[in-house]
Amino acid sequence: MKKVLFATTALIATAGMAAAEGVNISGYGRFGLDYNEANDVTGNLDNTDATNITSRFRLTFDVSEETDGGVTVGARIRAQAENRDGAQGNATFSSPQFHVAYGGLRVNVGNIWGAIDSAPGLYLNTTSVGTGIDGMGFNSLAIKGAGFDTFTSAGAGVGGIEAIYSAGGFTGHISYSKQNGVAGTSTDANGVERTALMLNYSFGDYFVTGAYQSADNGRTITKGGVAVEADDDLIFLAGGADFGQFGATLQLAQTEEADSVTLAGEAEIGAASTLIAWVNSTDIDTGVTAGQTVTDGTAFGINYEYDLGGGVTFVAGYVNTAADNDDNSVQAGLHFSF
């Protein structure tokens, strides 16, 4: 169970390590059926169906070289094509990420990972890091109503700089990004500036994570009858434990709009099956009356995966969101990595 439970932790813990010199191509594909009641509600077009194909194909290109002094310099770029909710997509390249690494320190520039998005315990330990084939809305995340930086696989990304340091069981990650507002206008509504810090420590079969983000996104909400700036400030805490065949993760988050908590449990069933169930409870700030992007209430889901060997996994998932109506989704399909 540990190799599954701490998959994200291991990724961050090795982020400062230099990649092998040369060029490496990796990626994955996934495809299956998605049943989503929200796609077939009153007001939608008659030919909008609740059941659609969901798929993605991703290629990741990593290049690196090492100087005579042992410093690794490299870059990453991705190509991705996705089909979701019946909308067929063509392949698009991401903007690049550049890095310099030495020992346990790595500095990324460009299409950064983001300190919050890299926090262990934020995502589920599944092939989609959410529920089902494509994440199914990632309702399991405790962070509600606040954006944060992440590597954009099929677009420009935010453009920033970050530093990740790992030593033993400790990982520290700080990131900064700045997007300008709309040129030629008197508003900064599209300008976003974020600074985030994440600290993680793994000890034995346990891990704890703490993260904080200070941000200015130019968006406003009404709070207590007064228009205020809805910054993407957030606090995130998580902890997890491995109990052999079983594992558990608890995450808590506070944003401008809501407080939220998610509890996820994992179980190995036999030699090839893994079952993950989660429940999320979100409480909206009662002072927010306009511009609200969060749904109050309880959401839950379950994800089942069966390892078919050769990097191929059968995936099935179910999600019931916190929305009042049309809130059921079911997916099933195959995921393969290479």
Image (spheres, grey):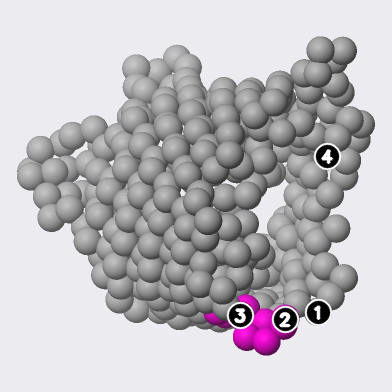
Secondary structure type for disc 1: strand
Which quarter of the figure has residue 259? Answer: bottom left
Q: Which numbered disc flags the more N-terminal residue, 2 or 4? A: 4
Q: Quadrant of the C terminus?
A: bottom right
C-alpha span from label 3 to label 2: 8 Å
Label 2: state its secondary structure: loop
Residue 152: percent from the left, percent from the top?
A: 63, 41
Task: Say above or below: 279 vs 24.
Answer: below
Question: Sequence order check: which comes first, mark 1 or mark 2?
Answer: 2
Q: Residue at x 72, y 81 (%)?
A: 272
Three-letter amino acid code at the position of disc 4: Phe
| N-term-proximal mark, 3 vs 4 | 4
Res. 195 image quadrant: top left
Given the current orientation, which residue lies at the most extreme bottom position? 270
For residue 61, the mark is 4
Which residue in the structure is indicated by mark 2? 272
Question: Rounded to the nearest whole Å, what is the CA distance between mark 4 and mark 1?
Answer: 26 Å
Q: Secondary structure at mark 4?
A: strand
Q: Nearer the viewer, mark 1 or mark 3?
A: 3
Quarter assignment of residue 128: bottom right
Mark 3, other Cα within 10 Å: few <14 / some 14–19 / many ≥20? some
Instruction: Give the main secondary structure of the magenta stretch.
Output: strand
| Number of callouts | 4
Mark 2 and mark 1 in contact (Cβ < 8 Å)?
Answer: yes
- Residue visible at 32% across and 43% down in the picture: 235
Q: Label 3 belongs to which residue?
A: 268
Marks 4 and 1: which is nearer the front?
A: 1
The residue indicated by pointer 1 is 308
